[in-house]
Image: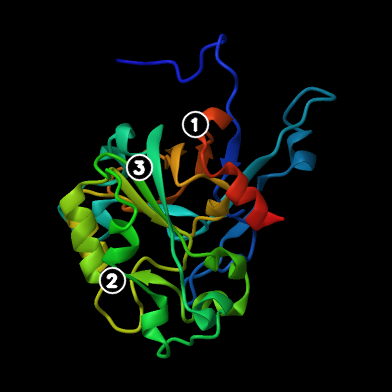
């Protein structure tokens, strides 16, 4: 088994930014899917009859669908013969160099007023948003910051969300990123039954992370992305604790720009 260190004592510790939503009892991530049920399997009180005096434990139980919170889709989510979670390479999920695409959406789309059928053009993220960055995408984590995460946990999150176009997905497949993520309800338009972005990316063995958050706190380039799920066989999707390690100030050219936007 091959292992490697991700931190050397002689190097300064890098700042980590949490890119995941918190999963809790009753959380609705996607309308129509059940919320997680979080409860005790063994309560602390019940455990006292099992262990020595002064020793107690809690064993929790959670019942949930795979698409809960911030999660990763493997090809098996879309294709019966696709790679499942247990077959995803860690090189696609951990310590991946990051490119953040800052999406300029129409005013109604930013505010959550576009509606499921309205102002589609304001919500669509096309090839130009990616290509204008002029950076190499191969083996990178390409993350789309739309700002839609501000609605998470509230009614506006479920309608009129930003999404990638089929042309954008084809462009990504051609440029071979390691993984693609978005801070929106779905990487596809959900107005109809087609899911071209899922179909194209997962068909090319490119995992997808949905429902990210706080992408505005990481630079356009230079961060390292992590989104590792539980290693489950015959399963296509699972929540992740996604996060990014920021580059040091010397290698973070848009740090001041992000600070001014958050002020």
Residue lying at 44% horizontally and 64% vertically, measured from the top left: 103
- In-image side of 184 versus 131 (left or right): right
Q: Position of residue 114 (x, y in %)?
A: 49, 86
Residue at the disc numbered 1: 251
SS category of the residue bearing label 3? loop
**Residue located farthest toward the top when viewing the structure as drawn:** 10
Q: Quadrant of the C terminus?
A: bottom right
- In-image side of 165 versus 220 (left or right): left
Residue at the disc numbered 2: 165
Q: Quadrant of residue 38?
A: bottom right
Residue lying at 17% horizontally and 56% vertically, measured from the top left: 203
Q: Is residue 16 above or below residue 134?
A: above
SS category of the residue bearing label 1? helix
Q: Answer few, some or many: residues within 10 Å of disc 1's Cα (few below 14, many 20 plus, some between 14 and 19).
A: few
- State the colouring used for the structure image: rainbow
- Residue 247 visible within the image: yes
Circles 3, 1 touching at the beta carbon (< 8 Å): no
Q: Position of residue 128 (x, y in %)?
A: 29, 65
Comes first in the chain, label 3 or label 2: 2
Q: Is residue 87 above or below residue 209?
A: above
Is 75 in front, or is 187? 187
- Residue 73 visible within the image: no
Q: Quadrant of residue 188?
A: bottom left
Comes first in the chain, label 3 or label 1: 3
- In-image side of 147 versus 178 (left or right): right
* Tag in front: 3 or 2: 2
Q: Is residue 141 above or below residue 11?
A: below
Label 3 – label 1 distance at C-alpha: 37 Å
């Amino acid at each position: 088994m091959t292992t490697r260190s991700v931190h050397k004592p002689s190097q300064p510790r890098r700042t980590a930014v949490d890119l995941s939503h918190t999963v809790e009892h009753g959380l609705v991530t996607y309308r129509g899917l059940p919320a997680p049920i979080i409860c005790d399997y063994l309560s602390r009180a019940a455990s006292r009859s099992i262990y020595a005096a002064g020793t107690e434990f809690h064993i929790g139980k959670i019942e949930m669908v795979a698409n809960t919170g911030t999660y990763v889709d493997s090809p098996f989510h879309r294709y019966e013969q696709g790679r499942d979670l247990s077959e995803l390479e860690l090189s696609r999920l951990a310590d991946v160099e990051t490119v953040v695409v800052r999406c300029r959406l129409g005013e109604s789309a930013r505010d959550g007023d576009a509606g499921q059928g309205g102002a589609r053009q304001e919500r669509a993220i096309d090839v130009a948003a990616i290509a204008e960055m002029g950076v190499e995408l191969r083996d990178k984590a390409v993350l789309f910051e739309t700002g839609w995460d501000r609605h998470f946990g509230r009614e506006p999150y479920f309608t009129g969300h930003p999404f990638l176009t089929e042309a954008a997905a084809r462009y990504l497949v051609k440029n071979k990123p390691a993984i693609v993520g978005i801070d929106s309800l779905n990487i596809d338009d959900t107005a109809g039954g087609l899911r071209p972005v899922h179909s194209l990316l997962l068909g090319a063995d490119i995992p997808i992370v949905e429902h990210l958050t706080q992408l505005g706190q990481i630079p356009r380039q230079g961060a390292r992305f992590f989104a590792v799920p539980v290693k489950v066989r015959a399963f296509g999707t699972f929540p992740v604790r996604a996060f990014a390690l920021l580059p040091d100030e010397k290698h973070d050219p848009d740090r001041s720009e992000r600070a001014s936007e958050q002020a």
